[in-house]
Image: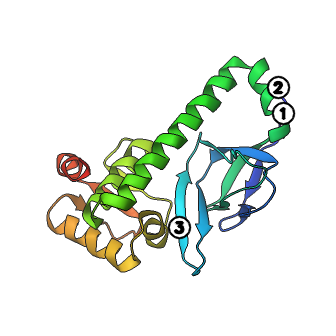
Amino acid sequence: MAYIDVPSRFRKGQTVFSEGAAAQHFYEVVAGTVRTSQLLKDGRRQIDAFHLKGDLFGFESSSWHRVGAEAIDDVTLRIYPRSQLERMLAEDSEFAQRVVAAMMRSIERAQSHMLLLGRKSALERIATFLLDMSGRLSEMSHLDLPMSRSDIADHLGLTIETVSRTLTQLERKGVIELPSHRRSIILRDRTALRRLDA
């Protein structure tokens, strides 16, 4: 399989690719977390997805990237040449299955994100986000989120203040616990979260 054999490392905050740049590669997260986002005309940022270990991203139907990608923390990526994708899919059935599964998950998450932004309240958005991250990170009750409150806000279409206020509201209800470490969240009542996510 033809790809850059030595995984590439990106420091926290480093750009992987820019919005509007030529889409010559796609990527696999080996370690760390990548956010993909788009800048709106008024300067606001909309984060469309967070890519975690094992995720493939950077696929485009056109010749340029519609979003930009940045490393949230120190990230290691495998970089695949887009020009070789067809051959790679034909020669490696296991890789082909992974690519198809990644694309299907991407479509599902995009559809869920549209519903979340269009129809859900702040409380419902936070509940959906916490359950999704729990499932993707560990399935454990203790979440060490790699992303900041600002990232969460820009992903959910909320302000940082609303994110913080909503998390505090959930803590007061005993649904979650917020330890002193700012990015840690303990899920105390998944049933309550699932009711909000319904």
Please name the amino acid that badge 3 sits on: Gln
Contact? badges 1 and 2 (CB < 8 Å):
yes
Q: Position of residue 184 (x, y in %)?
A: 38, 62
Q: Which mark is residue 84?
A: 1
Tell me the residue that label 2 is attached to.
87
The answer to which of 62 and 107 lies nearer the viewer is 62
Q: CA distance from mark 1 to mark 2?
A: 5 Å
Q: CA distance from mark 3 to mark 2?
A: 34 Å
> Which image quadrant for residue 41?
bottom right
**Which residue sits at x=15%, y=61%?**
174
Q: How many marks?
A: 3
Q: Quadrant of the N terminus?
A: top right
Tell me the residue that label 3 is attached to.
46
As helix, strand or loop, the secondary structure at mark 3 comes to strand
Please name the amino acid that badge 1 sits on: Gln
Q: Position of residue 123 (x, y in %)?
A: 25, 63
